[in-house]
Amino acid sequence: MQTTLDADTTPAPAHIANHPTHWRNRPFAAHFRTRDDDFDASKFGMWLFLTTEVLLFAGIFCAYAVFRMMYPEAWSNGSHHLDWRFGAGNTVVLLVSSWTAASAVRCAQLNKQKWLKINLIITLICAALFLFIKFKFEYSVKLGDGKAPGTFFSYAFAESPYEILWWSLYYMGTGLHALHVVIGGCLLGWVLYRSWKYQAYGPTEYLMVENSALYWHIVDLIWIFLFPLLYLIH
Amino acid sequence: MTNHDTTTHEEHAHGHRVVSWQTQLAVLAILLFFTFTTVLFYNAESWVENAFDIHLPWWINVIGAMSIATVKALLVCMFFMGLRYDKALNTFALLFCLFCVGLFLGITMIDLETRDRIYTWKEGEVALGGTGKGLDTPSVDARFDSSPAPTFNTAGLGIVEFRRAQGLEEAGSELAFWTDHYHHHAEHQHAADINNFFTQLGYDHHLALPDANQAVPRIGLTAGLFSAVDPTETHNTHAADDAAHQPAAEDAGH
């Protein structure tokens, strides 16, 4: 009968199993009664942080709504300059990475050390792929055309003077999101490093995996709304 | 350690629910399906517009895309982020945040939609005793319509500026106008008092305002508010006045 704790059939070598960072050897914070209290409090803290992230992007969404109401023609022209195929492709990339992040949490819970690492690696590859598509096929091409934000704007074929606003909002929204992709990638990379070196995460100690994955899911959530707003609505 | 011997889909790690891989894969498939749907919807709409040369109303596009995005977001929150299996407190935090976002967006939209309505109300004509009307409501009393109140053309001035200009005219001089004002309100210089009659009339000794280097607790009435100040006295006694009142202001500070 397979149990939670020995789901990973290959035991860790002694120098890893005895390392203080190995998940079996990790204590919980002394001021909590139980390990569960520690876990729940930390996770709630992460959720509170995620709400501030939502509010941060709400400013961008609000600016989008205001400018779209004020200058609908500029917004329509602007969204027609974007290719939905890159947006949809990046959506698929992020959804898959969200799935692997959720799977990574599951593997940590079940002590499947090998698949934990594989899932994290796929997530990181997806993060890199997202940024590559964004910068290679979207940013660099558009900046080359002069479709740049603010005073850098030099596109000669704009039909509305307010298209500058569209591009400013586009770069602000997607740029801030790309920054979050980078930060989320760093967090998951840290999880992967510690998992690789110490087997730091397992059934009783997977808070960092869980919180990093939560952060990654919020990055996915923001994109779920940015994609239709920028690429599909016109 | 809890639940060592569970082998069903409802596996547990340290008392936490482990979502089965089948569930996670199904959620991913549904998310990809909805992504496909929203793109299909967008392309179908574009095709209809081009093929039949019609312009669909804007809300079809917006409602279609945003409702699919909302369903996708719900799936990610419930299953990938685990809110479905989690403590309700985390869901509550997110819902409260979304409520705040709703307020933020909603009040901004109300402001944007109704801003033009008050422009006409703020300037132009002023009716004596009011018009008896709200911004966009009929008058509360039919008599307002049958015999409208006399109106003044304010020549484009806002009602506040218009009334101030009238007040200046009534008082006869700027000095008399501000003398009367500061007689009742000597706490601070009025924003419209651009020639600084506040200082000229000798009221500024009342001010002991806090700044970066000095904290001035203001408790109770403004110091010197009821002390006799003769506004007809001119500026030459001003410096002496200041010196005389300085201790009083400090007393009030303590």
Image (cartoon, coloured by chain):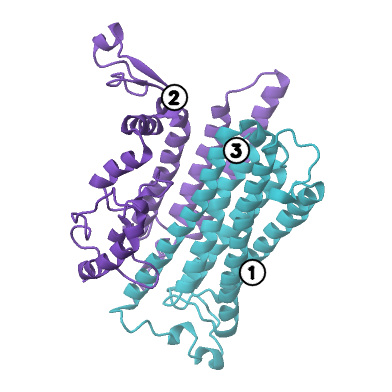
Q: Chain of mark 3?
A: B
Q: Quadrant of the N terminus of chain A?
A: bottom left
What crowding class fits label 3: few (fewer than 14 Cα within 10 Å), some (14-19), or many (20 or more)? many
Among the chains pictured, the one given cyan colouring is A
Q: Amino acid at mark 2?
A: Thr
Residue B200 image offset from top left, x and y in percent: 36, 52
Towards the viewer: B207 or B20: B207
Residue B159 appears left or right of A232: left
Label 3 SS: helix
Q: Which chain is purple?
A: B
Q: Position of residue B173 (x, y in %)?
A: 36, 36
User: Callout 3, which amino acid?
Assistant: Thr
Q: Residue furthest top?
A: B146
| Residue at mark 2 | B120
Residue B38: mark in rendering: 3
Residue at which label 1 appears = A121
Q: Label 1 near label 2: C-beta < 8 Å?
A: no
Compute the Cα span from label 3 to label 1: 29 Å
